[in-house]
Structures are given as C-alpha cells and as structure tokens.
Amino acid sequence: MKSHTNSGVDAERLADFVLFTQRSCILNLSSKLNKDKVSFPQFFLLAYLSSEEYLTMSDIAQKMGHSTAAATGLVDRLQDLQFVERVHAMDDRRKIMVRITKDGAELVAKMRNEIAISLSDVMSEMDEEEADTINHAKSAINRRV
C-alpha cells in the first residue's frame, strides 16, 4: 500500500502528465477542429452524442453546463455543419431529440484516434517510474468507475 507522501508525489506527476498531454492534444485538436469549423464546446457535445443514441436539449444543457438557449445555439451550429440532426421523440412529437450523424461520428472517431496517437507518443517516452505513476492512477480511476 502506498503512503500518502508517495500518493502526493504520484498526484503531482500525474498532474504534470495531464497538463503536458492536454496542451499537446489541444494544440493538435485545435488545428484539426478549425479545419472543420468546430469549436471545443461543439466537439465535446459531439463526443457526448457519440456515446448516446440521442440527447434531449435539457440533457445537453446539463452535460455542457449551459443554459438551454446556449445548448440550442451549439446544436444549431452543429446541425448547419451536418454533424447532428434533430428528430421528434416517438412518444411525444413536441419533444426534440438530438443525435449525431455519420459525419459527426466520423469526426469524433478521427479526433479520438489523433488523441490516442498523441498519448501513445508521450507514453512511449516515459521512464519506468512515470509509467508506474500512470498505471497506479489508471487502476484507482477504474476502481472508482
């Protein structure tokens, strides 16, 4: 069992890893998303939608930490880009559901792959101690999930 001192050091190392990889991934993502005219909040919404069959506007507002009006704006822009579509709920036609399109899903898959490649490059350069820190953090996260 690790002591709190080692856990604190691991947390600091993990924080450095997250900051470094986040910066690296964000710079890479930013240029690629700009080509598709997609903002980070729009991309994060697409990522949420890629793991769900659909989301209501209320769901989107809650997940994104936005008002329903702001969520509607995000969806409008993504719909204009043909990355999402609105459909009526079967049980209540007044209820609007938002789902990702094939083009939206392809964009998310492409970006996830870019992130995985970037992380793989960073992780391949780690020494044993750094890799252990990541593995311990990964195990702790998996236990909590």
Image: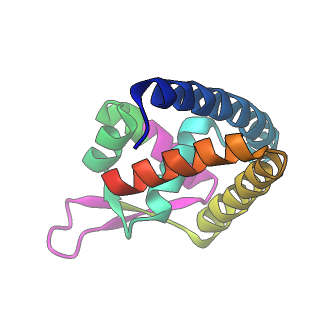
Residue 33 in the image, given as x and y percentages of width and height: 74, 44
Residue depicted at 65% across the width and 27% down the height: 16
For residue 118, above or below residue 53: above
Residue 87 in the image, given as x and y percentages of width and height: 36, 67
Left or right: where does residue 37 sit relative to residue 13? right
Residue 145 at least partly seen: no
Choose top left, top right, bottom left or bottom right for residue 49: bottom left
Left or right: where does residue 76 sit relative to residue 37? left
Q: Is residue 79 magenta?
A: yes
Q: Quadrant of the C terminus?
A: bottom left
Residue 20 in the image, given as x and y percentages of width and height: 72, 30
The residue stretch that appears in magenta: 73-97
Left or right: where does residue 114 sit relative to residue 6? right
Q: Which of the two residues, 118 or 35, is positioned nearer the viewer here?
A: 118
Q: Is residue 62 magenta?
A: no
Q: Quadrant of the N terminus?
A: top left
Residue depicted at 55% across the width and 68% down the height: 101
Left or right: where does residue 50 sit relative to residue 97? right
Residue 25 in the image, given as x and y percentages of width and height: 73, 40
